Image (cartoon, rainbow, N blue to C red):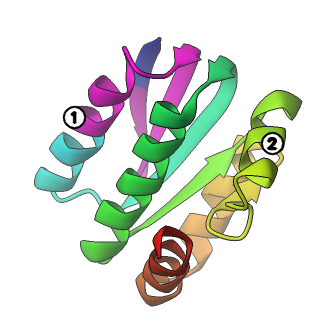
Amino acid sequence: MTISHRRVGSVVVLELSGTFGAGTAESFSTTVQSMLYEGRRAFVVNLAGVTRMDSTGLGALVAACGSVAAAGGRMVLAQLPRRIQSVLAIAKLVTVFDVFDSEAEALASLMSETPRSDVVSSAVAKTIL
């Protein structure tokens, strides 16, 4: 998997491509943690290029969402391929993540709202428990 990132205002856009799983999830987690350390609190994870995601990749997304929320930020997902949408639905995680059809919609959401860390943290906690 490759991860590229760019900033759009105060939002970090992470573009993922390839297989998101056991061999690549740690790289994603490290990238998010590094950005949090730099003080970034708003993230769009663009999954348009992800061809496959396993449970480790899904776990990394949930953990990153929790870390961002704990830091007072917000992470949203954009452009999920149909296969990845199915994985989220099967795992009953559709309500944990804010999902947008386009990156532009995701960016607009983050730029127009204050972080909803309490809502995300609560949803992640309920899913994990």
| Disc 1 from disc 2: Cα separation | 24 Å
Q: Is residue 127 above or below residue 56?
A: below
Q: Residue furthest left?
A: 37
Q: Position of residue 62 (x, y in %)?
A: 47, 55
- Residue drawn at x 41%, y 32% is 6
Magenta stretch contains residue 99: no
Q: Which residue is mark 2?
A: 85
- The amino acid sitting under disc 1 is Thr
Is tag 1's residue or tag 2's residue first in the polypeptide sequence?
Answer: 1
- Residue drawn at x 58%, y 57% is 76
- Residue drawn at x 67%, y 60% is 93
In the rendered structure, which segment of residues is drawn in magenta?
Answer: 5-31
Q: Is residue 43 above or below residue 67?
A: above
Is 12 left or right of 109, judged from the image as shown? left
Q: Which residue is mark 1?
A: 30
- The amino acid sitting under disc 2 is Gln
Helix, strand or loop under label 1 = helix
